[in-house]
Image (spheres, helix red, strand yellow):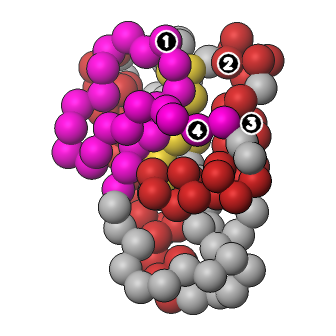
C-alpha cells in the first residue's frame, strides 16, 4: 500500500480495480483495511475486498483481490503530511510483503530464488 499518508492507497485501489491487472494476477494488498476503505469511500472507488488479518493464513487459491490487514497504524495519519507513524507503517508493509514472499517460495520451490515459481497471486504493498 505504500505510505498511508501518500498516494499509495489511491493508486493501489485503482490498480486492483483494473481488469488488465485482475486478468494477470490476483492482487494481495498489504496495508490497513480501514484506511483503504476510507480512501475508497472518499474517492468513490471499489472496495469490499476480503480481509485477511496478520497471522491468519492466506488461502492457497484466490479468485479475488484480498487485503492483508496489519492493523499497525499507531497515531493519526493525515493525507499529505509526513509522520513517523506513516513511515513506520509503510516499512511494516514492506517487511510483511517480504515475509509473505518467503512463505510462498518456501511452499512452492526448493531454492532461495524468488524467480523459481509461477503463481496466480502477486503481493502488492
| Residue depicted at x 77% and y 26% | 18
The reply, left or right, for residue 50 in relation to residue 110 is right
Tell whether position 52 is magenta: yes
Tags 2 and 1 in contact by the CB under 8 Å rule? no
| Residue 53 image position (x, y, % from top left) | 28, 45
Q: Is residue 51 above or below residue 86?
A: above
Q: Is residue 10 left or right of residue 3?
A: right
Rendered view: 70 above or below 63: below
How packed mark 3 is, by other alpha carbons closer than 10 Å (few <14, some 14-19, many 20 or more), is some
Sooner in the amino-acid sequence: mark 3 or mark 4: 3
Quadrant assignment, res 42: bottom right
Q: Neighbour class for label 2 at 10 Å: few (<14), some, many (≥20)? A: some
Judged from the image, the secondary structure of the residue bearing numbered disc 2 is: helix
Q: To which residue does mark 2 refer?
A: 22
Where residue 29 appears, as percent x and y from the top left, is 52, 41
Q: How many marks?
A: 4
> Of marks 2 and 3, which one's residue comes earlier in the chain?
3
Which label belongs to residue 15?
3
Q: Residue at x 64, y 52 (%)?
A: 41
Q: Residues within 10 Å of mark 4 (few under 14, many from 20)?
A: some
Helix, strand or loop status at disc 1 = loop
Write down the residue under mark 1: 63
Question: Would residue 28 be visible to someone looking at this image?
Answer: no
Tell me the CA gap for discs 1 and 3: 16 Å
The residue pinned by badge 4 equals: 47
Amino acid at each position: 500500500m505504500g505510505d498511508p499518508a501518500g498516494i499509495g492507497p489511491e493508486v493501489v485501489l485503482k490498480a486492483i480495480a483494473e481488469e488488465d491487472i485482475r486478468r494477470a494476477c490476483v492482487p494481495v494488498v498489504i496495508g490497513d483495511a480501514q484506511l483503504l476503505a476510507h480512501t475508497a469511500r472518499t474517492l468513490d472507488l471499489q472496495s469490499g475486498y476480503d480481509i485477511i488479518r496478520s497471522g491468519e493464513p492466506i488461502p492457497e487459491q484466490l479468485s479475488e483481490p484480498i487485503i492483508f490487514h496489519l492493523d499497525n497504524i499507531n497515531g493519526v495519519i493525515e493525507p499529505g503530511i509526513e509522520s513517523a507513524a506513516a513511515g513506520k507503517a509503510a516499512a511494516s508493509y514492506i517487511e510483511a510483503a517480504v515475509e509473505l514472499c518467503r512463505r510462498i517460495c518456501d511452499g512452492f520451490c526448493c531454492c532461495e530464488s524468488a524467480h523459481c515459481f509461477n503463481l496466480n497471486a502477486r503481493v502488492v504493498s
